[in-house]
Image (cartoon, rainbow, N blue to C red):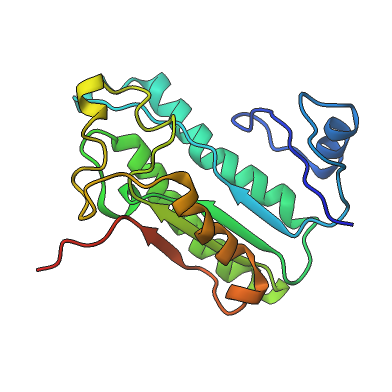
Amino acid sequence: MRGVLLIYFSLRKISYSTAEFNKYAQSGGPRIAIEFCVSLDVLVNNAAFQVHTSRFEDLTPEHFDETLKTNLYGYFYMAQAAVKEMKSGAAIVNTGSVTGLLGSESLLDYSMTKGGIHAFTRSLATHLVPRGIRVNAVAPGPVWTPLNPSDKEAKDVTKFGADTPMKRPAQPEEIAPAYVFLASPQCSSYITGEILPIIGGYSGG
């Protein structure tokens, strides 16, 4: 039997062991969507925190700490807990970003964490090859989700994604197939350690 377990908790401060994770799930948790299944076939890491900073000197230690703990610690802890329950054929799909490839002048700490996620993806992929577990990442460009315009002025939101060759941001449903592709052993059984950019095209020469 296959199913999905949906729960909400913070991964910034604690690495949940399998026993703690199961205890949390069985206790009712904040939200359990469907019956928890014994087999864990796919982990998608997608949590993120970002706040734009116009001046490097204004990036506070608290802001920096929250960004790193949300974007890096969470992925590390989730992967560490998941692999204990994964068998050969399972897959981990991390969420990177074009900022981790190209950088971003106003998302300094966020870009650093996304670059770290890309490196973590490739390193963990190599580490888990002998166990038959694939690890890849999707690196989206601008995507129309609540995270991206959350700290922007209205005039800036209207321009979001306009600097891509397609002149617009992606919709989430345009990114989702990439996760399905990388999660499916039928589609990507020979792919691991890859960073898949989905950025609305390249400007060319």
Q: Nearer the viewer, residue 34 or 22?
A: 34
Quadrant assignment for the C terminus: bottom left
* Residue 105 position within the rendered picture, expressed as x and y whole percent measured from the top left: 20, 38
Quadrant assignment for the N terminus: bottom right
Describe residue 65's horizontal placement relative to residue 28 as left or right.
left
Q: Nearer the viewer, residue 127 or 103?
A: 103
Q: Is residue 92 above or below residue 22?
A: below
Q: Residue at x 51, y 42 (%)?
A: 72
Q: Is residue 179 above or below residue 53?
A: below
Q: Residue at x 52, y 53 (%)?
A: 176
Describe residue 99's horizontal placement relative to residue 172 as left or right.
left
* Residue 91 position within the rendered picture, expressed as x and y whole percent measured from the top left: 66, 63
Describe residue 186's horizontal placement relative to residue 149 as left or right.
right
Q: Is residue 24 above or below residue 121?
A: above
Q: Residue at x 87, y 50 (%)?
A: 37
Q: Is residue 16 above or below residue 128?
A: above
Q: Residue at x 41, y 45 (%)?
A: 171
* Residue placed furthest toward the bottom: 190
* Residue 15 position within the rendered picture, expressed as x and y whole percent measured from the top left: 69, 37
Number of marks in picture? 0
* Residue placed furthest toward the left: 205
Q: Quadrant of residue 134?
A: bottom right
